[in-house]
Structures are given as structure tokens and as C-alpha cells.
Image (cartoon, grey):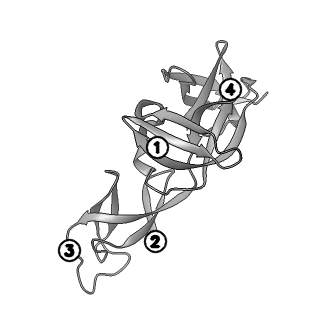
């Protein structure tokens, strides 16, 4: 059973008798002496997707849930659902746009190395890789002679994701994007 201070994004825990997926953790250190560090945790109900915000102390304990991580790849869209194929048994699992939330912006055709989170053989969410390589679909023209540490400009990917990129990048270039904070890492 993990303490609040040991939780990570993507963990599945039991909260009020139901499985919840940890989506975001923010650490708050109070300024007064002797005060406990607080962990503001945003989690989604695994089946309904309902968001829950909870503030916990570092030594508060949440119950673990038996879940499995399986490697999957994105197959296709069916209406508003994203269909993923399990790499082990080739079974297909659908998740709605609401289930994925902001993670849907990182999912593109042919994407591999997504981890599916399964509870009792039902996919309740996904875990993105630390970085993805995407093609810049739309951005202002590149500036010759711009340095890598110069100003940035917005670039839009095919999924609608907008990333701040250096001024020298042009439309059609492949870039590596950090999925944790939606930031440009490098050319690919």
C-alpha cells in the first residue's frame, strides 16, 4: 500500500472503494515550521472518468489495486473512440476521448509503445511513453540564422497539439515532444 508521497502519475489506487487512476500530483510545502508537506492529487474514476481532487499528507496511505500494464498500439478511430490493440493477444480495447483527456492529443496513426492499464481484463486507461515524435503540420516560416536558444513560436501537430518550438523549425519537420509537460525536446 503506497503512501501519498510515493504515488506517481499513472498509478492505480483504490479510493472510496473504487479504482482511480492518478493523473496529476502537485507537491505543496507549507512555510510554517512543523507543517506537513501536502500532496494535491487529481485522479479519475477508472470506469466513469469522474475527476476527483484530494489533498493528502505524505504518510497517508491509499490501497493498491491489482492491475496489469500491457504494451499496446493505437489502431484506429471508431467515432469518438480510440481503439488500441494488445501486442500480446491482439485483442482490441476502446477508450473514449473523455477517458483519455489531454493524452488524446499525443495519439496518432501508427503509434506504438503505449502501455494499457488493465483491471480485470478491462482497459481503464493508458500510459504514454515519456516522449513522442510528431510532424509539425502548421507553424510560421523558419527564420534563417535563428539560434537554438532564441525565442520560440507555436507549432501545431496533426492531432491539434500546440507546442512552443524554436524559431528555426519549419513546417513538415519531425520533432521530439516531452509528454509530461508538452515541451519541445529536439529535432527527430
SS assignment at label 1:
helix
At a point 53% along the width and 59% down the height, the residue shown is 131
Distance between mark 3 and mark 4 Cα atoms:
46 Å
Name the disc covering residue 103, or none. Answer: 1
Instruction: State whether residue 82 is above or below residue 34.
Output: below
N-terminal label among 1 and 4? 4
Residue matched to label 3: 141
Distance between mark 3 and mark 1 Cα atoms:
28 Å
N-terminal label among 2 and 4? 4
Name the disc covering residue 186, or none. Answer: 2
97 left or right of 123 in image: left
Residue matched to label 4: 13
Q: Quadrant of residue 137?
A: bottom left
Disc 1 crowd rating (10 Å Cα; few below 14, some 14-19, many 20+) is some
Instruction: State whether residue 53 is above or below residue 16.
Output: below
Decide: marks 2, 1 in contact (CB < 8 A)?
no
Q: Is residue 133 visible?
A: yes
Amino acid at each position: 500500500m503506497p503512501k501519498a508521497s510515493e504515488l506517481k502519475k499513472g498509478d492505480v489506487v483504490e479510493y472510496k472503494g473504487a479504482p482511480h487512476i492518478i493523473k496529476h500530483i502537485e507537491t505543496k510545502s507549507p512555510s510554517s515550521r512543523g507543517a506537513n508537506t501536502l500532496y494535491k492529487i487529481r485522479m479519475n474514476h477508472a470506469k466513469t472518468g469522474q475527476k476527483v481532487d484530494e489533498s493528502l499528507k505524505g504518510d497517508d496511505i491509499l490501497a493498491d489495486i491489482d492491475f496489469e500494464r500491457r504494451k499496446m498500439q493505437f489502431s484506429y478511430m471508431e467515432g469518438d473512440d480510440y481503439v488500441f490493440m494488445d501486442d500480446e493477444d491482439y485483442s482490441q480495447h476502446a477508450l473514449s476521448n473523455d477517458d483519455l483527456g489531454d493524452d488524446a492529443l499525443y495519439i496518432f496513426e501508427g503509434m506504438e509503445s503505449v502501455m494499457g492499464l488493465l483491471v480485470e481484463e478491462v482497459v481503464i486507461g493508458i500510459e504514454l511513453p515519456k516522449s513522442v515524435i510528431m510532424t509539425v503540420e502548421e507553424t510560421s516560416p523558419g527564420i534563417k540564422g535563428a539560434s537554438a536558444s532564441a525565442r520560440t513560436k507555436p507549432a501545431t501537430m496533426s492531432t491539434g497539439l500546440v507546442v512552443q518550438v524554436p524559431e528555426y523549425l519549419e513546417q513538415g519537420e519531425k520533432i521530439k515532444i516531452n509528454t509530461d509537460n508538452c515541451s519541445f525536446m529536439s529535432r527527430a
